[in-house]
Amino acid sequence: MTQLTLAQAERFAALPLRNLDREYPNNLTHFNNSAADVREPHELHPIFWGSYDWHSCVHGWWLLTRCLRRHPQLNDAPRAHDLYARFFTKTAGAGEAAYLDAPGRGTWQRPYGWGWLLALSAELSLWDQPQAQHWRAVLLPLEQRIVARFPIYMEKLTYPIRVGTHFNTAFGLLLALHYARVTAEPTLEPAIMAYARKVYLPDTAYPAHYEPNGDDFLSGALTEALLMAELLPVTEFAAWWNRFLPAATTLFLPAVVSDRSDAKTVHLDGLNLSRAWCMRGIAARLPGDQSGLLQSAAAHEQASLPHLESGDYGGEHWLATFAALSVEGLAD
C-alpha cells in the first residue's frame, strides 16, 4: 500500500471538515431510559454529534487526524485545529463516557463504533502535534470502557457476525487489533487471536458467490480474511486462504452502484473501497504472484473513488474514510 498524497489528504479531509459540526440531518441511534433522555444529538454526545450519526462522526475525526498527521501543511489545518480545541474538552469526553454507562447501552455501537473509537485513539497517539496527547486524554474514559467491553463481547459471541454492514465482527476486531498494536495495550490482541482461531480458523469454502448484498459496505469474506492475514503466520495464512476461498472470482468484480442518492445503495461504493483495502492487505501477506488480487483492488478503487463528492449527504458523510483505507489501510 502507499501513503496518502497531499492532494488526496486535501480532498479527503475536506469532507469531514464539512460535516463534523453539522448536526442535521441526524440518524440518531439512541436508547431512551425515560422521557428525560429525549434530547438533541449535541446534548447526548458532546463530541460526536455531527456527520449524520455517531460512528461516522468518530471515523470522520479519525480521517481528519490521519490526513493531518500525514500532511500537517493542509490548507484547512488551522480550521481543523480550531475544531479539535472546540470539541475535545475534558467535560465533553466525560459526557461521552457517561452516555455509554447509562442502563441499556451495553451493546450500543458494538462493534463498529467501538472499533472506530479505538482507531481514533490510536491515531491520536501517533500524531506528533503538540495538543494531540491532550485530545487523546479527553477520550481516555471512553477508550477504557470500550477496551474492557471487547473481550466480554467475544466471550459471549458464540457465532461471529458475518454481515457486510456495521455489525460485522471481523471488521470491529481489525480496528481493535490495530489499536492494541499501536498503543501496546496488552489484553486485546491475545483475546482477538484466541477468538479468531476458534471461530474463523475452521472456515472452508466460503460461499463468496452470494456477495454482495444490496447494502453491503464490507465483504464478509475479505474482511475475515484480512483479519486472519493480520493474525496468522504467513505459511499458515496461505494454507487457510486456499481452504477458505478456493474460488473467489466473483469478488473480483466491482459492485455496481445504481443510485448514489439512496443512503443504503451507496453503501456499495464503500464496499468497493473496503474490498480494495482488504485485497491489498491480503496480497501483501501471500507468497507468489498476487497480481490478480492487486489488479482487482485497483479496479474496485477506480470504480468508486471518483464518487466521494456525489452531492448527496448519504454518501458524503462517510465515504472518504473508506477511500483512505483503500489507499493506505490502517497502517501507522
Image (cartoon, rainbow, N blue to C red):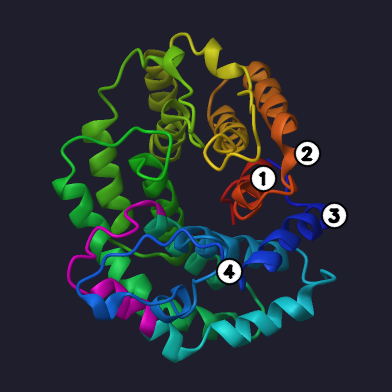
Q: Earlier in the sequence, mark 4 or mark 3?
A: 3
What's drawn in magenta, residue-wise? 95-112
Residue 160 sits in which quadrant? top left
**In the image, residue 12 above or below residue 185:** above
* Label tally: 4
Residue 230, position as x, y percentages in the image? 45, 40
Q: Give how far apart the Cα atoms at labels 3 and 2 are.
A: 14 Å
Q: Earlier in the sequence, mark 1 or mark 2?
A: 2
Residue 124 magenta-drawn? Answer: no
Q: What is the three-letter code of the residue carrying label 1?
A: Ala
Q: What is the three-letter code of the residue carrying label 4?
A: Leu
Judging depth in this view, the residue of 39 and 161 nearest the camera is 39
At horizontal 58% and vertical 29% (from top left) the residue drawn is 279
> Is 250 on the left-hand or right-hand side of 327?
left
Q: What is the three-letter code of the residue carrying label 3?
A: Ala
**In the image, residue 145 above or below residue 5:** below
Kindly report which numbered mark, 4 or 2, lies closer to the viewer in this rendering: 2
Q: Give how far apart the Cα atoms at labels 4 and 1 are.
A: 20 Å
Residue 103 magenta-drawn? Answer: yes
Residue 295, position as x, y percentages in the image? 70, 21
The residue indicated by pointer 1 is 323
> Is 302 on the left-hand or right-hand side of 141?
right
The residue indicated by pointer 4 is 126
Residue 99, position as x, y percentages in the image? 31, 75
